[in-house]
Amino acid sequence: NTKSRKWTPLCQYRLEDFHHSTNNKSSSSSQTQIDPFPDLKIQIVKEIVNTGGAIHVDEIPLDTGKEISAEEFHSILVDAQQQQEEGDASSTDGSGMDGERPLKKHKVDDMKKKEVVLIDVRNTFEHAIGHFIHPTFSTTRGDSSKNDSTARSDSVVDVKDKDDTSTTKATTTTTTTATTTPTTSATPAINPNTVTFSHFDSTFCSQNSESLKDKKVLMYCTGGIRCVKASAMLKQRGVKDVSHLSGGIHRYLEKYGKDGFYKGKVFVFDQRVALDADSMLVVKQEEEEEKVVDDVGEKSHDCQHEKQQQQQLQKQKDVVGKCIECNIPYDEISGANLCSVCRDLILICPSCRITLHEFHCERHQRWKDAYFTFLERFTVEELEKQKRKLQSLHDSYYLPAKKHKNVRKTLRKQMEKIDARVDDIKVGNAVVEQNAKRRCRTCFESNDICDGRCWGFWKHSQSPHHVQGGGNGSTLEPIMEAKVGDRVTVGPNWNEIRLGGRGSQQDPVRLGTVVNIKSWASGGDELDCVAVKWDKSVDCGRRRNTSGTEEQQSEIYRWGVVARNGQRMYDVRRVVTGDGDSTNSAR
């Protein structure tokens, strides 16, 4: 507390709060055999969820929406669904506004209730694999083969994010006026199409707050944290009736599972990646386990096989995600499937993945034939064609220029990259590799070295070498010794595509100092990366400190990270003297 100059506890935990960090239940599911939270880290930050300064921490208690329990959230959705069904019944039996008989008084009162608007505050890839179904659109009018937007309002706001690359649509929720026979269609909650949470206010709220002022707004997110700030953003723009789900999707699914309004999986930001709705159900969990035990030995093999087939069919029906290429039902998120432009996670099925070298998210579909991270497989003619397409997008699509400043800058940088590649090919400094291997979008290594899951919890939980102990079954060699203060230079696995040249004309040899040693993988059990602060003569990142002066910025490099083939990767190496000690002056 800076005002009173007194220390106050930031957080307080009990022993039982940590019981969920492991899952000791016996199950055939691999999800339940992983310790999702192997470590505890407490850190003081300016914002728990980054808003880009849109919401100050002192404003949250004053402006945040009403926090409601899972039961109350569910009850509101049930009431909205019943109201919709009564409205449908009154219109089909001729007792509606256009019918021969007048509406009863309680029907008129129901029509005066505020319309419920359900908003998913999470990122696009999270919404893609699972979301709440809007109850007032569970039975929509018109052709069920139409896309979700036909079940919503004609009032559609085009939201163009200043960092976005295509038009995204945030829809308000006024039902259509067609009077054909109702058809069942599961319409998801509104997806604001945000890539990062900091965009929620500048895009969705700024464009849709006026249309939401007379609505009853319900918000939800994974654990209930983002909603606290998101509801404050809307209320500061004049939307009065805003509520958010306490405990988020987690608490709701613990109570209702897949029998509620949430459909699909929920992304959980740890080694479990995504969970089925029923895997989080607490109320019936013990009953189901007892039932399984009672059934063992009582059913024949044929009955068990039939039950497994039924469960598999039901699982397929529960899939709400779709492959971005072929549009088939698919909801497996992998750290290997990233957009080449923005590195956003995308859904792409194995059949489509094997045919493509690089992938593009929904926002960047306009770029999919022109923007590629790796250019070694393209001829001069193909590169020039890509540049023409990018130039066309730059000059005609992303206007006005000020609004799309960052997008246009990205396009220009890619065109400069293409020009440099074309020049290298023409003068003989580079050759076209039409059979070039697919590369990881994160570390830029070829797919025989990296499977694309080399970052965050993906590596620790899924990469083959962690399962097999070395890719080829051999014993891993120990990591080379390193300590803070060691002098280092470019190592044997330095990747120039990702890390830049090995030096400059002024300083042909890079030299730097190790300032930290840490784990490359989130929750990893090895210290396999180093933070290096390069000498000031090297052209690398700098930042201003609190006093306003520039300071050298450290960079992270691999130090013994295990590749897919079992090889340990070293981006840098120690500079040693003749007696084997690290030196500050060796070149």
Image: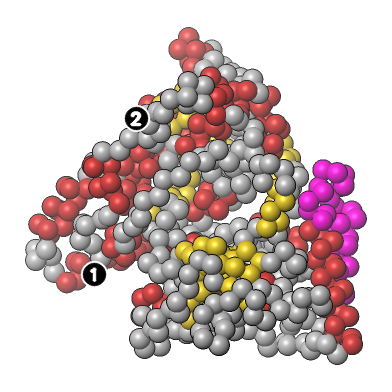
Label 1 crowd (10 A; few <14 / some 14-19 / many >=20): few
Q: Please, what is the three-letter code of the amino acid marked with disc 1?
A: His
Q: Is residue 295 left or right of residue 531?
A: left
**Residue farthest to the top, as pictured:** 105
Residue 305: assigned label: 1
Q: Please, what is the three-letter code of the amino acid marked with disc 2?
A: Glu
Does 192 sit above or below residue 479? Answer: above
Give the mark toward the camera: 1 or 2: 2
Secondary structure state at the residue bearing disc 1: helix
Residue at image location 49% in from the left, 12% down from the top: 109
Q: Which residues are magenta?
A: 383-409
Residue 18, given in percent of the width and then of the height, sits at 28, 46
Does 101 sit above or below residue 57? Answer: above
Q: Earlier in the sequence, mark 1 or mark 2?
A: 2
Q: Is residue 489 left or right of residue 508?
A: left
**Which image quadrant for residue 179?**
top right
Q: Is residue 27 left or right of residue 211?
A: left
Label 2 crowd (10 A; few <14 / some 14-19 / many >=20): some
